[in-house]
Image (tube, coloured by chain):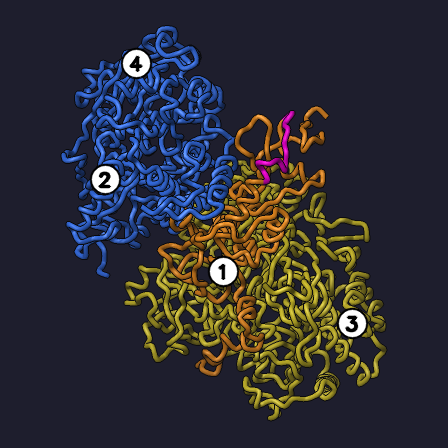
Chain colours: A yellow, B blue, C orange
Amino acid sequence: MIKPDRIVTSTCPYCGVGCTLELHVKDNYIFKVTSPFDSPVNHGNLCVKGRFGYDYVYHPKRVTTPLIRKTPQKAGERAQAFDLSEWREVTWEEALDYVADRLVEIYQRDGSDALAVYCCAKATNEDNYLLQKMYRALFRTNNVDHCTRLCHAGSVVALQQAIGSSAMSNTASQVMLNDVFLVTGSNTTENHPIIALQMKDAVRQNGAKMIVVDPRRIELVDFAELWLPLKPGTNVPVFSAMAHVIVKENLINHEFIANRTEGFTDFIESLEKFTPEYAEEVSGVPAEDIRKAARLYANAKNGAIYWGMGISQLSHGTASALALIHLAFLTGHIGRDGTGLNPLRGQNNVQGASDMGAMPFHYPGYMRVDNDENASKWEQAWNIEPGGLSRKLGLTTTEILSHAHPGGVRALYIMGENPMMSEPNLNVTREHMQQLEFLVSQDIFINESGAFADVFLPATPFAEKDGTFSNTDRRVQRVRAAHPPKGQARPDWQIICDLAQRIESRLGSATAKWNYASPEEVLREMAGVNVDYAGITYERIDKVGLIYPVPDITHPGTPTLFKEEFPRGRGKFIPLDYVHIMEEPDDEYPFILTTGRVLEHWHGGTMTRNSVLDEAYPEARVDIHPADAEIHGIRNGDPVRVQSRRGEVVLRATVTEKTSVGVVFIPFHFAEAAANLLTNDALDPQAKIPEFKACAVQVFPARENDLANPEVVVLRGRY
Amino acid sequence: MSEIDLAPLRTAIEAYIPLGRSGLLPALHAAQNVYGWISEPVATEISRSLGVPLVDVHGVIEFYSLFYNQPVGKQIIRVCTDQACALKDADGVLRQFCSHHGLEPGQTTRNLALTIEASPCLGLCEQAPAVLTTDGGQWTIGTGSSESNRPSSMVYGLIRSLTANCGNGITSLASYGNYPALAKALGMTPEEIVDEIKASGLVGRGGAAFPTGVKWEGAAKAPGTEKYVICNADESEPGTFKDRILLIDDPHRTIEGMLIAGYAIGASRGYIYIRAEYPYILPVLEHALNEARETNLLGENILGSGFSFGIELRLGAGAYICGEETALFESVEGKRGFPRVKPPFPTTHGLFGKPTVINNVETLCNVPLIISQGAAEYRRIGTEKSPGPKLFCVSGDVATPGLYEVPFGVTLRELLEMAGGVVDGKQLQAVLFGGAAGAFATSKHLDVKMTFEDLRAAGLPLGSGVVMVFDETRDMRDILKRLGHFFAHESCGKCYPCQIGTQRQKEILDRISAGRVLEGDLIRLQDVGWTMTDASLCGLGQTAASAVLSAMKLWPEIFGRIKAEG
Amino acid sequence: MKDEIKLTVDGQEVTAEPGKTLLEVARAIGKEIPTICFHEATTANALCRICVVEVEGMRVLQPACIVEAAQNMKIQTRSEKVVRARKTILEMLASTMDLSEAPEILRMMDEHGASHERFPDAERREVPVKDDNPMYIRDYSKCLLCWRCVQVCADDVQYTYALSFDGRGYETQIGTFFEKSIPETTCVLCGQCVGVCPTGALKPKREYLLEQGMSPQEISVLNTGRKKRTADKRR
């Protein structure tokens, strides 16, 4: 038994559940993680990542010294350097001065449009606030974005349009109050494990009925009352058909529609075409099941909808999410405890990063940048001359890259993100990255994106800094350093402040303020304008986080939103059409590829592939249905080549009924078989989110030698 | 390992799939009938078909002695080595079988033809030494020097009301009569029936002696329409064989008793849970149930009364603890036989969490008697506080071991005289009363009347009616050692006092019986014994030390002094 | 209040809300009743029996963790029977398994004057450490069969059902389906079991390796170098 020197309470850096972690530290080393059983978020329960997957903090490959590329990289010829021998160790002085010099040079030469930044959905609220502040205040650009673009952008835009909000309306634990709930486009068991436990409790202990709408037979189906296995990309017809049934069978909540919504008449007209039979034709879901699902949800006392990437990551992701929002409007299952529209936010702090304005159209607090009043408030807060902040909408992540050519974006700053794994159509992404003139990576490992950089700034992981994360429930929770940073690594917010001051002195501008004594001061500054956070102080969230909006210092927080009205007043029905996925399967590419995640890994793998988690799931696999496998002569474990119009990967096949006929699934964590080499960069016109969930591929048998790591085999018996 | 053909398994377990988890033990028995043991692919298929988690299927196989997850012989010879058979040189019988076949106890021949096992009590104590041989779906019973596939019933006594039809082979429905007591009961109200049973003073005959009428009343009053009647035929108490005889010779009496109970409490479904060591009773019961069904005495709308009742048979799998009522529920529900904490009690939360009446076979056999005669007539035999007839299982060193039916109130001396007294003119050393979970009587107790109240006053439990006689030549240490082994083997392992206590008790008794008493052993045994008695979760633990504690009072020298090696 | 229960605890009159267990009632008045298997986040099974109290009129001692206070109950938390049972249970535990990482139980033993060597010749539970997955080890020599791990893996929390029991009685051990290694079972390595284990039988592997004398540096290189990052192998 080891007696810890101290036990530090913090928040998990992995998913949006935001479990409370107790880090047991001995000699500045976390040797164990536990969780308090009275945590209102996770009740002492964790998943493999939260409990055991923190060891990337100590991985020998972690970079803790500032680095500059030995060979200067030229736009158009940029190459990746994973090996430390291609980098020079430098002081912070030299690194930050170099970055400041180059950024200012490009800014002064090419203007605001030439600069862009990827903020980080894993970094703290304070880190993100400061980085977007730096780019907006100093470089007067709104080319600020982060990976939410690739995630719930569709959901956020839809919620903004129809409701005026951008988050879950209720909390995940309220699933215990649901008698019926719908889970769609979310393999909750593997992506929000603790929320899945609560969903299972709701079913098993409270007799709640769950409806799963998903092309894959995800693990939750074992607990579901109904499973609607729809063809990827047919969300709009299926949910609109449910709406059709609810209207036709007069299961609507007349009062709610009359008092709380607008646009109903036009909307009903648009529903005419969405009969269950039509939906069955396009989606493959039996019409009778659509009817059953509609009746079940509409007749519930407390119905709720939880959704994930299967809704948002489509070229019509906004429309998909709107189709869900309509269901809540029709039935009144929103604005009360135990109901709601609940997009399950993926990253530990994607909600927070979005709240902090790390987005091209919004300042902190979702204040639109093209609104003078909003801009003024932030000009005042940041000591900027009136009219100084750009009112022009900025570029989104995918657009930032596609604009990386002479005349477009020349300098990119990436904080804790890995577009070379998470953007679609990686071959083209690579080309874009190569076009950059200057690239800074602020991270903890040299990942596939950082390998392209000119400068590497070693930041600290969650275990070595203080700050706050905002989870998917809108709960703002404390992050605390378990021990001082390793080597010369520095907390992100400190790096940004240091850099910003150097930039300011080169620009000769009045300071927007960068001398914070603590991260709390940063939060308080942001909360001065973003009223949602107004009443949040570190003291108030010392033991348990607060759920924003917290309008003042005595307010207890707001688990359930929209009890009286929506932020935009009335909820708006928005008529929809069925838009096909951009790349339907054909003779040449007969399968639909849908991508996603597995329990043991996180996204681009920067953390989890440098962790013991990789031992638990060491290689990429493609899921293929037994019927398809048989036709193609593929047995379980055989190497196969999966090809799309854009690229190809070689990996082993898992023959399983977890996927549907005609659909294959690849998790996108594995650099040696990066699923995004295959995916389609077609974007949703409003949300600009790529269609990760559907593109056309072909599958061929391959040889063992074609595999990147033929000796590695997954040994699993679980989900 | 070659691919196993699962087709016969699928056929065998098809009927159990709708039962889900509750079909697990029947499915495992069926699988074992096909393959002889349960391999991983077979367990996996059962898990998949019934929807039971893999590890739970494994855990159930591991709990029950008669389920095997390693290959075993097609033929299995089980030699009982418990107390009554030990008196008749069971150890010698086992040795003989083993040396004949070149095996150690517990071993299997290389060609998987044969396994030889020592077994806990087989319920054939009056015919000791007992051997049960199974071979696929066949069985043979060996007792003394004879072999058959149907054990004899030696029934004696002063009265023959419970055992009226016993001792002459199976009693058909025609001989028994078309359930006249049930017909009478159906003309009464359920409340009247409960009152009659209460008035009769009938208490449970399985060992706990709970007032039957009160139990039925509790279940009758419990809310809900899903209720159950269970016949506890898991007779595993060493020295007990009464239920075996009642069921194999006169099955209809028990069935009729269940039906009356069902009508009285408002149940429409019943189970007979019978121990797997009585395979020869299964076809008898199946046949009897079919007879009853064909005569509209079982099933829908019985005798046109509107009362419907169905009975399902369930087989145990080698676990004495499953005679404990809540452990029995767990077993029927397809789980390891861990007893539940009470309260809540079975009358409100029993099988599947529903109101349940669970009664011993002998208890149920009293019911038609009471309803036919009426409580007043029934009470004319026995004593005021212990009315009615009682069955005693007499075995050991007596001339005529067997099942004796007497009215309550007969003395021990009288019973032993009926049984021909101690064999070979020897002196009586001790009588084990009540079974392994019982206590020792000596010649001091010969004139104690065998009633609940008199025995209690004498510090002796009636238990399940076991009367096992030991003559002066018997080494009581060996008897105690076997008792210790029995409880250690049968402890379910849930609660600490019994899980560890039975093991520690066994270790000390092993030492003592080998003549190696250590200083402090008496206190150790007392502490362990009293801890089990006072703090165990269920009746097994609470009585695991009772015989030992009574032996300590009678023969303290066994526990405190090292005997000269002999 | 009409609904309140009045009972007597060690001679002291106490009132309690309906539904409270004797353990809760005792704790509310500052009386400590020892527990071992009881855990706030798992279903109480009342199997360790260390929390038993003597209730007037009941022959068998009652587990305080599960028995609810009833009107006019008279209980004693340290009667002679209770103390004897507790002491003996602790001595039996000490004779069975390795309690070195269960400080609360060791403290209970001191408080009750329980001896670690009460049972000479006792067959102890000694099993080699099971180290079959990257996240945690299972040292069943320390397992006291409190059931918590099995329960949290099943319906109490995780609904994963990777653990159950092998054997019966004293031979009981926590086991997997046909003794498969953890990665071959339905275990998802959530570690809920590790989080509730009271004796260190389940322990994070990292902690275990440190105890074995490995340094953090040595531990970090354990799972590296197995394969290179192969981003450059993409076509």
Tag 3 and tag 2 share a subunit: no
Task: Tell which subunit mark 3 falls on.
Answer: A
Tag 3 and tag 1 share a subunit: no
Q: Give the range drawn in magenta.
A: C71-83
Residue that carries the numbered disc 4 in the rendered image: B304
Image quadrant in which you'd find residue A358? bottom right
Which of discs 3 and 2 lies nearer the camera? The answer is 2
Does the CB distance between marks 2 and 4 fall below 8 Å? no
Tag 4 and tag 1 share a subunit: no
Tag 2 and tag 1 share a subunit: no
Task: Tell which subunit mark 1 falls on.
Answer: C
The crowd level at tag 1 (other Cα within 10 Å; few <14, some 14-19, many 20+) is: many
Does the CB distance between marks 2 and 1 fall below 8 Å? no
Residue that carries the numbered disc 3 in the rendered image: A389
Instruction: Say what amino acid the circle numbered 4 marks.
Output: Gly
Residue that carries the numbered disc 2 in the rendered image: B89
